Image (tube, rainbow, N blue to C red):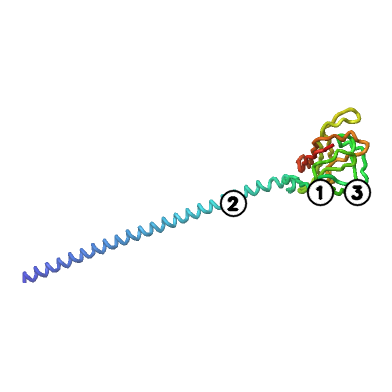
Amino acid sequence: MRGVLVGAGYGFLSYLMRESNARKHAELEARERSRIHAQMYGKANSAKTMSRWFLLLALAALIGAGAGALVVNLSLVAPLLSSGGDTSSNSKPSATISDYGRYRNTGPIRVVPDRKTTSGVSAISDRDFILLEQTDQIPCQVGETWGFRIRCSDIPANLPYTVRKETYHPPIKQSDGSVRTKDVNEFRRPPGASFDPFCGWYFLKGYEYELVAGEWTLVVFIDDVEVARKVFKIQN
């Protein structure tokens, strides 16, 4: 009986020990699962936090870029507002020489007083010119009409503008005894208006003192911008 009791007691004790070990094992597994869950939850929260920060940073970058673009756009618009929206002033006038050389006038040439010229007179023709010969070698004789014609672009459309035609030549002694080496003809044109495309010289009867051989240079300016230049050789 004692052996039975001892055996039963030993068996019961073994049972209790197994139960205790099982509980400890279960507790360890539960703790491990809790730890793993906590780690996973922490990582998830960390990822969510990083995602929120990333979204906030991206949003801030977009707002900053938008503000920068607004500043840039305003900087581009400001000059337009200050100039009344006129962008034509940004383009400089230009011209190309369409033809040059010796010409024949299809009508009479008149000499009229002109205070805007250096010589005090201008030669005017109401007719067009016909190109006789494209050359930069001009005979030094009465009756010769020579120079060039230009084709202009970017002429101010909304503002009046100034045209200046300059002629540089060898010294010419005037009838009053003075000597000139430059002749200037300057005039104003209304917005968008064209002007005589011919820039040249007339060797006229009665002005034989202008028959001076050498190098002559014709230059055209629009609003002080040089748009055309040509050198001619006047030959005896």
170 left or right of 21 in image: right
80 or 183, which is in the foreground? 183
Q: Is residue 136 visible?
A: yes
Q: Is residue 30 above or below residue 103?
A: below
Q: Residues within 10 Å of mark 1 (few under 14, many from 20)?
A: some
207 or 160, which is in the foreground? 207
Which quadrant, please, contains the N terminus?
bottom left
Q: Which residue is mark 3?
A: 106
Specify the amino acid type for callout 3.
Thr
185 left or right of 48 in image: right
Q: Secondary structure at mark 2?
A: helix
Q: Which residue is mark 1?
A: 192
Q: Residue at x 75, y 46 (%)?
A: 94
36 or 69, which is in the foreground? 69
Residue 181 drawn at (x, y percent): 82, 32
Looking at the image, tell me whether mark 1 or mark 2 is earlier in sequence order.
2
Residue 155 drawn at (x, y percent): 78, 47
Q: Quadrant of residue 36?
A: bottom left
Q: Which residue is mark 2?
A: 66
Task: Give the Cα separation between the discs numbered 1 and 2.
Answer: 40 Å
16 left or right of 113 in image: left
